[in-house]
Image (cartoon, rainbow, N blue to C red):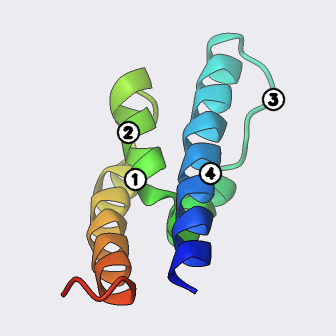
Amino acid sequence: MNLIFNIYFFIVNIISFVIYFIDKKLAIKHRYRIPERILIMLSIIGGSIGSLLSMMFFHHKTKHMKFIILNPILVCVWIYIILSINKII
């Protein structure tokens, strides 16, 4: 069970990172964007680390308070969940 959860967590963070990158490229080209609700949902389902890293690397969504506040909180929540599931804490 732990292995499956860890693989899920890794994959969802990679997907989240890539989706933020794609949205940033679309924003630069003034094209149709990925809805913010999708970006937030990715963070909620476990992609908050990927989201936060992409915000830092690509400087994307760094002026939106809901992303600035929500992603670090969700990172803490998901780190706690991961540590609990893996019986580290």
Label annotation for residue 6 = none
Residue marked by disc 3: 32
Distance CA(mark 4)–CA(mark 1): 17 Å
Which one is earlier in the sequence, the residue at label 3 or at label 1?
Answer: 3
Comparing marks 4 and 1, which lies closer to the viewer? 1
Please, what secondary structure does the residue beneath circle 2 have? Answer: helix
Please, what secondary structure does the residue beneath circle 3 have? Answer: loop
Comparing marks 3 and 1, which lies closer to the viewer? 1
Distance CA(mark 3)–CA(mark 4): 12 Å
Tell me the amino acid under the disc marked 4. Glu
Residue placed most toward the observer, 75 or 60: 75
Distance CA(mark 2)–CA(mark 3): 23 Å
Label 2: few (<14), some or many (≥20) within 10 Å? some
Please, what secondary structure does the residue beneath circle 4 have? Answer: helix
Residue marked by disc 2: 53
Can you give x and y, in whole percent of width and height, for residue 36 in the image? 62, 51
Label annotation for residue 36 = 4
Tell me the amino acid under the disc marked 1. Ile
Q: Is residue 32 above or below residue 13?
A: above
Q: Name the residue furthest left.
A: 89
Labels 3 and 4 touching (C-beta < 8 A): no
Residue that appears at 59% across and 64% down: 7
Residue marked by disc 1: 49
Q: Is residue 49 above or below residue 59?
A: below
Query: Quick check: 65 left or right of 38?
Result: left
Query: Quick check: 68 left or right of 8?
Result: left
Can you give x and y, in whole percent of width and height, for residue 83 in the image? 29, 79
Labels 1 and 2 touching (C-beta < 8 A): yes
Which one is earlier in the sequence, the residue at label 2 or at label 3?
Answer: 3
Quadrant showing the N terminus: bottom right
Can you give x and y, in whole percent of width and height, for residue 48 in the image? 44, 58
Label 3: few (<14), some or many (≥20) within 10 Å? few
